[in-house]
Amino acid sequence: MTETASSLARFAVVMPVYEDQEAASRLMKNLRREYGDAVTVVAVDDGSVRHPIDAGTLDEAGIRGVVIKLRRNVGHQRAIAIGLNYVADQMPDCPCTIVMDSDGEDTPESIRELVVPLQSPDVDVVVAARKSRVETWRFKAFYVVYKALFQLLSGRRISFGNFMALKPFAIKRVAAMQELWMHIAACMLTSKLRLQTTLIDRGPRYAGKSKMNFVGLALHGFRALMVFAEDVLVRVGIACSLVAVLTVAGSLVAVGLKLAGFATPGWFSVALGILLLVFLQTGALTLMTLMLTGVVRSGSSNPIDYRAYVDEVLHAGKRG
């Protein structure tokens, strides 16, 4: 066994698992080999049916921790939210919590790099941005477009995913945020916590295939925008208002050209009709945007009880 992560005496690892028992089991064994008794695993089984994990999976890997069995499949973002809420509720004194996927693409070895900036008193959360990706060109192209649209619509940059390290204060803060249940990375951006980005290589998958498809990726991106719904709606409203002003200006120009005798037969009516339709559509969209902004502002902020999703919590001890 090698040295533990950057002088941390102990830390917890929250990982969502869905029909991925083989890869998760290998990851747990590698965590045990790298960090020994310093690591405690909080594995959230997201309603797996064919290949579920249980306490025996952790015992076989020789690692301490719990398996949180959910009543139903809720998706990996909510599964992570449940795991973080469990840590905040049951492990409040844990000095560091790592969030990572269970497929091996977030490598155990890179935890050492991830936690180094966390030693600073001016850093609450360390997030991993990828130096390299083992992905198809289609995924890479989609990711570039997604980041550009996210910045355009929300005014913020997003360059990281689920792989991150959090201090106890950060865990307590995000556990009380509803945004955590929509999109983990976007929640970190809106949490006002002090974030530090670290470049880390992404590893290959240990086993099996990813359950995420294009539709799932698109929904994942839209959920990130939902966290900043107010900002997005205001930006869309401003853009619609700008288009409306331009259509009015264009209509005035068309009327001026008609009165000056520069309009060809039929041109004026067609141009004015198109501009009028554009104006009416943008006006309606602006009104809808303002209404949605009011709905978002008046939305409930009651915290979600993670225990409502939990079927049972299985505790595992280290063998031998």
Image: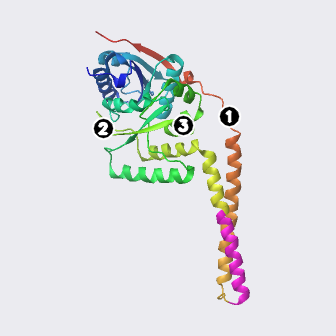
Q: Nearer the viewer, residue 52 or 17?
A: 17
Res 71 seen here? no
Which residue does the numbered mark 2 point to in the structure image?
Answer: 203
Give the distance between the C-alpha atoms of the residues marked 1 and 3, in whole angstroms.
17 Å
Magenta part, dominant SS: helix
Query: Disc 1 or disc 3, which is closer to the eye?
Result: 3
Q: Earlier in the sequence, mark 2 or mark 1?
A: 2
Which residue does the numbered mark 3 point to in the structure image?
Answer: 187
192 shown above or below 320? below
117 shown above or below 149? above
Amino acid on which the number 1 mark rests in the picture: Ser
Give the distance between the C-alpha atoms of the residues marked 3 and 2, in whole angstroms.
25 Å
Task: Indicate the secondary structure of the residue bearing disc 1.
Answer: loop
Find the magenta span and give its range: 242-261
Q: Position of residue 70 (x, y in %)?
A: 48, 24
**Residue found at x 31% / y 20%:** 32
**Residue found at x 42% / y 47%:** 214
Query: Which circle marks residue 300 in the picture?
Result: 1
Query: Per the image, is 85 magenta?
Result: no
Identify the image quadrant of the N terminus. Answer: top left
Chosen colour scheme: rainbow
Query: Per the image, is 253 magenta?
Result: yes
Rendering quarter of residue 308: top right
Amino acid on which the number 2 mark rests in the picture: Gly
**Residue found at x 55% / y 21%:** 307
